[in-house]
Image (cartoon, helix red, strand yellow):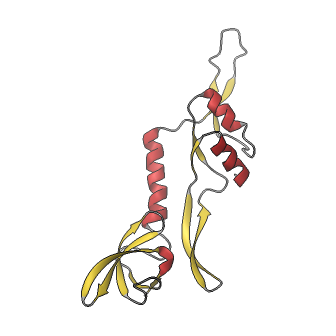
Amino acid sequence: MGDRAIQALKAAEVDMFQPRTSEVVVRRGRRVVRHAQLLMRTVFIGVRDAPHLDEARNAVGVAEIVSRPEPDTGPPGNIAGMVMHPVRLDPEALQRFVDAVVTGEIVAPLSVAEGSSVIVRAGPFASFPGTVDAILPGDRLKVAVSIFGRTTPVEVGLADVAIV
């Protein structure tokens, strides 16, 4: 899905989730966090009812809504056959999937893990060594920095540390 489709879905007030991953790259000598789609051209949407689904389906840039065939349950006298209905995901199964995606995105970003030795490269704690205590949402790290022999928890960005 392109930006036009995402903007059209936002205008239609459709709740959506776009799985993505993060990695630290160097651009023009600076370390930045780059986000990439995890499932290319895929967005999970939540709709209220059939008209809301039709509005999302007709949004500019939406190519297809994943559907599955079901037997026609229309009024008697219709020609028997299969009808394509949008796939409905079980909320618990979708939550497990989202948790797996988030775990892959937040808890295990590329090259950084809990317990890794790092050196802070930016901010007031630049050049201080530390250990990653936790990986937080939003590409943030909780690092235990050694200051005058005492460890102090500091929250820094993923791009603001270097792996030792």
Q: Position of residue 86 (x, y in %)?
A: 62, 34
Picture coordinates of residue 14 (x, y %)? Answer: 60, 40
Q: Nearer the viewer, residue 41 or 130?
A: 130
Residue 163 location, quadrant: bottom left
Q: Is residue 81 left or right of residue 132?
A: right
- The residue under the point 65% across, 20% down is 72
Is 54 placed above or below 161 here?
Answer: above
Residue 84's x, y, as percent? Answer: 67, 30
Q: Is residue 13 left or right of residue 78?
A: left
Q: Is residue 20 visible?
A: yes
Furthest residue in direction front, as rendered: 124
The image quadrant where one finds the C terminus is bottom left
Q: Nearer the viewer, residue 113 or 57?
A: 57
Q: Residue furthest top?
A: 77
Q: Is residue 2 visible?
A: no
Q: Is residue 12 above or below residue 119?
A: above
Q: Residue at x 62, y 17 (%)?
A: 73
Looking at the image, residue 108 lies above or below residue 79: below
Q: Residue at x 58, y 28 (%)?
A: 49
Q: How many labels, in total?
A: 0
Outermost residue, left side: 150
Residue 93 location, x and y as percent? 45, 43
Closest to the observer: 18 or 146?
Answer: 146
For the point 38% across and 88% down, which residue is it? 128
